[in-house]
């Protein structure tokens, strides 16, 4: 069964490094999602794996076999694009059978596999339909099934759901995950949709400017990221500049504006500049209390269905974003209200202040 190893792969376009020494291991039957800003190199990476682009340096192994010298069609890789590349003049059945036909499979085998694929995507009754007669989601199902029909077990998905409507995209991503599990596939899935990646991946890879910043499970990269870039890029978070004012074993005291907070920390010394973060869902708003440690005035209220987003200017001198679940009942605050902000400090993260500056660390693109 397929596993993948990418070793120090680089690809340059003039002086621009689309990939800069990228290394990645993907285990057999693992579902890996790659996310990152536009132009970070994620699509270039999977095109190098597929053989569409030849890297300038590094090596790529599939099942311990070096594949740079192997042609695209002989790498036994299924590739699904965002642009649904079905043959418009062929009905669904013929689209599914095409890959097998060009490989000179016997007619009985082609019929058997094609029927299996039609059943797999629950489209046997649409087998005579042309792509133009199908919805976008149905077309992409056919494209995925056509790739599976060839017998590939390693699949590269390049924004496969990006052109679909939100509801269709949400439904189809779970079907993709279930297909991968049922058929024991190894999948590398490039997407710009962070929710998509977090909801279906076994492991998430975050890229920036041609490099891998970090990898981890969806929970790890969202709740306990190793880098400040990941914390800021994946989901929404509050970025707070601070300074260590005191330490004790396992903890340090941080001053953020005029607010002081104790946070877990095994390193650092008094005077160190740091950056604290906390995601908006770990802040709770309450009516103003006389014993409040942190208070603020609501500047903006945005209702988003399942949550309400509050923009707050704290009396400690820094802004905060808070999310309140609609089901919690604590969503009746309005702009101008002064509130108590209850901070779930165990969900606060502390990072060293970046040597290159906070703005450069968080930048999605390289500065000129």
Image: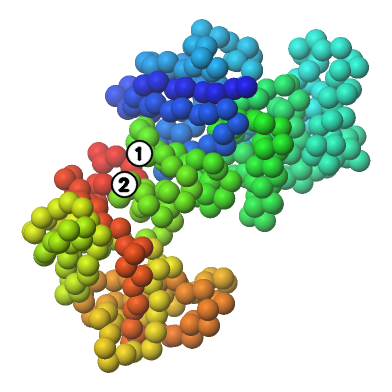
Residue at figure coordinates x 36%, y 70% from the top left: 344
CB within 8 Å, label 1 to label 2 = yes
Tell me the distance, in whole angstroms, between the alpha carbons under discs 1 and 2: 8 Å
Q: Is residue 326 visible?
A: yes
User: Is residue 220 positioned above or below 55 on the image?
Assistant: below
Q: Is residue 226 left or right of residue 134?
A: left
Q: Quadrant of the C terminus?
A: top left
The residue closer to the viewer here, 132 or 201, is 201
Q: Neighbour class for label 2 at 10 Å: few (<14), some, many (≥20)?
A: some
How far across and down, in percent of the image, does residue 341 sit? 34, 79
In the image, farthest residue toward the bottom: 290
Q: How many marks?
A: 2
**Quarter occupied by residue 103:** top right
User: Is residue 353 positioned above or below 47 on the image?
Assistant: below
Location of mark 1 (residue): 213
User: Is residue 293 positioned above or below 66 on the image?
Assistant: below
Residue 227's label in the rendered image is 2
């Amino acid at each position: 069964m397929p596993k993948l190893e990418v070793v120090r792969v680089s690809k340059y376009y003039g002086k621009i490094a689309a990939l800069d020494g990228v290394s990645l291991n993907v285990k057999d039957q693992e579902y890996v999602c790659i996310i990152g800003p536009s132009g970070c190199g994620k699509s270039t990476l999977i095109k190098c794996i597929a053989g569409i682009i030849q890297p300038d340096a590094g090596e790529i192994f599939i099942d311990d076999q070096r594949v740079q010298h192997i042609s695209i069609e002989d790498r036994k890789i299924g590739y699904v694009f965002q642009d649904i590349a079905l043959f418009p003049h062929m009905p669904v059945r013929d689209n599914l059978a095409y890959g097998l036909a060009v490989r000179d499979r016997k007619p009985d085998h082609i019929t058997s596999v094609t029927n299996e694929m039609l059943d797999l995507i629950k489209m046997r009754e649409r087998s005579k339909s042309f792509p133009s007669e199908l919805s976008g989601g149905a077309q992409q199902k056919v494209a995925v099934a056509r790739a599976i029909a060839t017998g590939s077990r390693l699949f590269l998905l390049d924004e496969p759901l990006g052109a679909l409507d939100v509801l269709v995209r949400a439904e189809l991503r779970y079907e993709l995950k279930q297909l991968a599990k049922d058929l024991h596939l190894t999948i590398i899935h490039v997407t710009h949709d962070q929710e998509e990646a977090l909801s279906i991946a076994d492991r998430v890879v975050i890229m920036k400017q041609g490099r891998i910043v970090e990898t981890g499970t969806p929970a790890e990269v969202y709740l306990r990221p190793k880098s400040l870039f990941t914390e800021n890029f994946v989901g929404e978070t509050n970025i707070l500049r601070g300074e260590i004012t005191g330490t004790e074993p396992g903890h340090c005291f941080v001053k953020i504006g005029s607010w002081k907070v104790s946070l877990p920390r095994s390193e650092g010394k008094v005077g160190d500049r740091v950056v604290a973060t906390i995601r908006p869902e770990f802040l709770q708003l309450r009516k103003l209390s006389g014993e409040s440690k942190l208070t603020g005035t609501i500047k903006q209220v945005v209702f988003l269905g399942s949550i309400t987003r509050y923009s707050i200017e704290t009396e400690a001198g820094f802004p905060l974003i808070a999310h309140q679940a609609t089901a919690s009942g604590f969503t009746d605050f309005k702009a101008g209200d002064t509130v108590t902000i209850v901070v779930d400090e165990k969900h606060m993260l502390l990072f060293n202040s970046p040597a290159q500056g906070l703005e450069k660390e968080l930048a999605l693109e390289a500065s000129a």
